[in-house]
Image: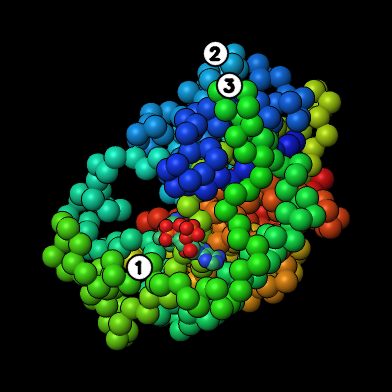
Amino acid sequence: MREAWIIDAARSPRGRGKPGKGAMTHLHPQRCLAQVLNGLKDKSGLDPADVEDVVMGCGSGNGDHAHDIARMSVLDAGWPMSVSGVTLHRFCGSGQQSVNFAAMGVMSGQQECVVAGGVEFMSRPAPLHAKGFTANNEHLFARYPMVPQGISADLIATVEGFSREDCDRLAVSSQQRAAEAIAEGRFKDALVPIHNDDGTLALDRDEHPRPGTTIEDLSGLQPSFEQMGQTIQEGYDETFDDMCKRVYPDIDKVNHVHHAGNSSGVVDGASAMLVTSPEFAQSRGFKPRARIVAAATAGTEPVIMLTAPAPAAKNVLKKAGMSKSDIDLWEVNEAFASVVLKFVRELDVDHDVLNVNGGAMALGHPIGATGAMLIQTALDELERRDQSTALIAMCTGGGMGTASIIERI
Ligand SMILES: CC(C)(COP(=O)(O)OP(=O)(O)OC[C@H]1O[C@@H](n2cnc3c(N)ncnc32)[C@H](O)[C@@H]1OP(=O)(O)O)[C@@H](O)C(=O)NCCC(=O)NCCS
């Protein structure tokens, strides 16, 4: 099988994702992704006419994200109408899946030049059209009462015995690492400044981090999902906590440890990565930055939902014929603190080489866009440290995980 090469990548800043509170919330998500596509074009020297397909992840899928946001953004970017676009949904793993599918298309010989990434403007939630993860399917809900993700994250902490303090310590470390990375300008090359329609600057830096966050600051925050878990919500006849206890009868109660500081931030953003075959890269004079060695997914129990990054990581290591010791850096999406703690426990990875520039608790997690951002962050950091190999893993809704291994060329 031939190789799939990463030529370059670009991302928007992550803007705060509350209507009216973030610097990009007034922009249409297509406008932001269009600017990231053009940022990638300018940075890499890509001729958009060469692009065979643009694969974009998006976890929302309706409202302003509706229909095929990849194709609409390609057109908004002014790229030739010959460039097609496809949008895919694997919840929080959508952006990573886009890159993995692009790699598969290239490795299989069906494609030469693909742009992959994702977009999510969490400030623009889609109108609710379906109840919960099971999308109004009562039969499936009876089999798997999939609770909201914050409650699944609390359930992981409960089952695994992670305390609120364990989670808060990880969140403080995420903030410290992100603050240091930003102060040293480590994200500078990755960022495409986003402009308003009148040409003025909207945002050129990540807006969510709170540098200087301490354990004491976090200890004062109220759990975000306790009331939701303990009260019967509209449309249900049982509390979410009782559903958890039904599926996990060994627990006495759900320990609600997650709050605004140790959960991933709600933000807006977009990402794009250029993936090509070696032959195509050579024909255009592109210098490759890395190869995508392997890609994998995994599925685990869907009520606890967020435990599949470790199995996905094991699967991708196996596919690559590698072991843990072959990996220099790890990126595991900080959807919630307990997700990362569970990953570390299962794979026994040293925290010193995991999420070294902070993660989504500090920087935010623009659902569909995050995967390509994490791959880009890992690649930039490998280059900065002059190291070789990174493994990137994420949890997703529905009890799935995505994983990729990249290796510098
Ligand atoms: C947990 C969650 C519900 C919290 O939402 P929220 O309360 O609106 O969170 P905010 O970020 O606005 O923070 C609320 C307040 O907490 C405090 N706070 C947040 N982070 C803090 C920190 N690091 N240090 C100190 N205080 C902090 C602040 O007072 C803040 O208010 P302010 O913005 O006016 O200063 C939300 O972040 C969430 O749902 N995250 C997960 C998203 C998700 O599910 N993604 C998919 C994952 S798989």
Callout 3–callout 1 Cβ contact below 8 Å? no
Q: Residue furthest left?
A: 237
Q: In this figure, which residue is indicated by the disc labeled 3?
A: 198
Mark 1: C-beta under 8 Å from nearest atom of ligand 1: yes
**Relative image position of residue 25 (x, y in whole percent):** 48, 38
State left or right for residue 390 relative to residue 102. right
From where the camera sits, is residue 89 visible?
no
The image shows residue 274 at horizontal and vertical percentages of 68, 34
For marks 2 and 3, give the one nearer the viewer: 3
Work out whether residue 218 or residue 276 is closer to the camera in this orientation and state it.
218
**Label 3 vs label 1: CA separation?**
40 Å
Q: Amino acid at mark 3?
A: Asp
Is the CB of mark 3 within 8 Å of ligand 1?
A: no
Labels 2 and 1: the sequence-earlier one? 2
Q: Residue furthest top?
A: 81
User: Closer to the camera: disc 3 or disc 1?
Assistant: 3
What's the mark number on residue 281?
none
Please name the residue that numbered disc 2 is placed on.
81
**Colour scheme shown:** rainbow
Q: Residue at x 60, y 17 (%)?
A: 79
Whole-Å distance between the Cαs marked 2 and 3?
24 Å
| Disc number for residue 225 | 1
Q: Secondary structure at mark 2?
A: loop
